[in-house]
Amino acid sequence: MQRLKYCLLFLVITSALSYGQDSSKTVNERNITEIQDAVSGINETIAEMKTTLDALKKIKLSGYVQSQFTSTNGAGGYDGVKTSGPTAVGNFSGGALGKDVSSRFLVRRGRLKAVYKNDLTQYVMQIDVTQSGVSIKDMYLSVKEPWLKTFALTAGVFDRPFGFEISYSSSSREAPERTRMYQTLFPGERELGMKLEVIPTEQMGFLSLFNFKFGVFNGTGPTTHDVDNRKDVIGRLGIGLQFQEQNVALDAGVSVYSGSVRSNTKYVYEKINELDSTSTNNGKYFDRSYIGIDAQLYADFLPFGGSSIRAELISGQQPGTKDDNRSPSALLTGDMYVRNFLGYYAALIQNIGLSHQLVVRYDEFHPNSDNSSKNIGAPGSNMGLGDLAYKTIGIGWVYHYDENVKFVAYYDMISNDEISPITTNTAYRPYIKDVKDDIFTFRIQYKF
Amino acid sequence: MKNVAIILLLAAVILGFSGPTETITVKGSDTMVILAQRWAELYMQKNPGVVIQVTGGGSGTGISGLINGTTDICNASRPMKPSEKSKLKQRYNSLGVEIKTAKDGLSIYVNEKNPVQEFSLAQLRGIYTGKITNWKEIGGPDQRIILYGRENNSGTYVYFRDNVMMGDDYSSTMQSMPGTAAVVNAVAKDEFGIGYGGAAYGKGIREAKVKVDEKSPAYAPTEENVKSGNYPIARYLYLYVRSRPSGAIKDYIDWILSPEGQSIVKKVGYFPVR
């Protein structure tokens, strides 16, 4: 009986244990299935999020703001004299200074750029937001062919493919402004048109040293409608040489601008400002043509760091008015002055350690290379302030506080040629000597 | 009290004479992160005045760090792109100095159970562009090929795309993994998976042989085959610095290229360049 009791007890315990094991096994299997289901769910969520994230990765937002204080050594840039001629400081440093005003705070540039980039196509929009309002800087699309990935077509408003200084971003440039030559010939830097770009890939060997840009444009600047049926052609052939072991690089290029400007009077002053009043001049097109060369040399200057020397020279013919030699963005209303010009600059930029840069830049611009500025205002001379030559020496210091913020302190010493001292034109009188228009800029930039 | 003053004085003198600590930051390639850590550990043991901080993140991240000034040295498993050199030129007036430190056979990982032993470059291109989707098309079982690869900030991702896929785009079905170890792990668990990465990470899976085309012999990514150039997808592993190196950075790079530094390369599983 006792044995039977033990046997029954044994059977109960073993069957209970067996049931427990089976039950625990079932629970474990159920748990595993639940975890597997949960992991599958997470994987599906991640896959869905990845699709969204991949789409978002194609959108890139960037921008920068340049806030600055500027001060000149002459009020209004004219020794306090109000004139009607082209301003010496204002137009070349972010807008004219008011009469008797010699210093100001300014948001020089407030850029916001949006890019949507697929592998071979992209959409780009850039606006500029400052105290003067909102304006469009870039608005273009570009398409690259899928076979060689070498040819790209761009259409819209974008940088003119000429020289080096236009395409060198204002956020990267060490000097606060582009040279007088560039601001005169290419105001706004950008233009409406279409461009073909040929940039051979590294796999193409020797050819990859070269690049070529060629475009057709309205010729009236970035924000105005075309005013005639002629289109302007701009192109640049560039070469880039790299000597990796020596850490030396040389980039160079030749650029050509071939365009025209229509005269809307019969009075045209050509080259040495001789009047041509043939009646057929009214409606006739006069060449706006430039040729330019540029070179940039990069090398280590130890123990300080990298340094670069950049230089450009542009020569050609520029139609304008008597007192203004800037490229026109609208139909000319007065008599046309067609001048041969010459401009050039050289700049040295020296990095010092990780955070500091020193800059020295010299530039000259002779809007009338056939005549001396001394004849401006002289009796019998047809020359105007549009013929006035300038020399500028700029010295600056750049401090990169971090990857976003940089400080720039820069001093431009601007010298105009002296014009005829016997001029009676009150607008010209200030230029019988060097106008006090040196300008100091202290700028803080935030870039992201 | 007098003793305390003497001890404090001695401590001040000793501390005063001990040189300042040099810190070198190294950032970049995940493929190189173990190698870079080994170099740093040994170098710091021998040079107590130098602190080397190593982080990964991918070659693209390292190059961005070099451009942004957040790292002294960048590890990269691919050469710098022209656009990256251009950014460096803009900011530092320098192309960046490239130093080849090791050679790596880019391995093709398959699961140990997978019967496929070798691939031609055309097959790999077909697989990763999504034109070949089933193992049976290349002599394997009738199963879908599961693609594992790297994220686009990885130098390995760029190198594979440029040199194996000839610039074509990856198939949208490829699963992007955050590091080579993750690729290896995924392929080890997935019988029908395929992945790519550095030779040093090839543990727990099988590294397939690779041939230039159908007529060529296939080679495994061994030291002999990588050095002889027979293995078709071998690459250099680079260090980049902004300017020609000087001071502590130069000493460190010189040591990496010394026999001692190059012996670490071999221990980690890559192939020395000197």
Image (cartoon, rainbow, N blue to C red):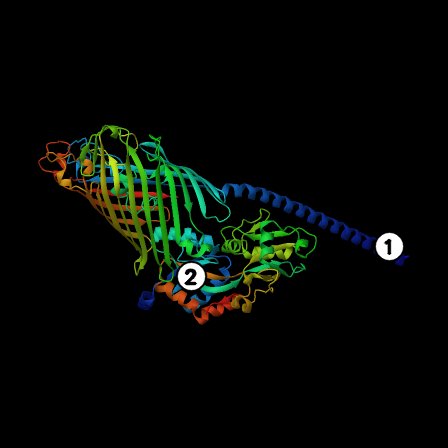
Is B262 drawn above or below residue A307 in the view shown? below
Circle 2 residue: B52
| Quadrant of image for the N terminus of chain A | bottom right
Q: What is the quadrant of residue B106 in the picture?
A: bottom right
Q: Residues within 10 Å of mark 2 (few under 14, many from 20)?
A: some
Most foreground residue, A419 or B107: A419
Circle 1 residue: A8
Which residue is painted at 26% across and 49% down in the image?
A397
Is A373 drawn above or below residue B8 in the view shown? above
Which residue is painted at 30% across and 49% down in the image?
A294
Q: Which mark is residue B264?
A: none
Q: What is the quadrant of residue A100 in the picture?
A: top left
Residue lying farthest left?
A: A422
The chain letter under disc 2 is B
**What amino acid is labelled 1 in the image?**
Leu
The image position of residue B228, as x and y in percent, is 52, 68
The image position of residue A50, as x and y in percent, is 56, 44
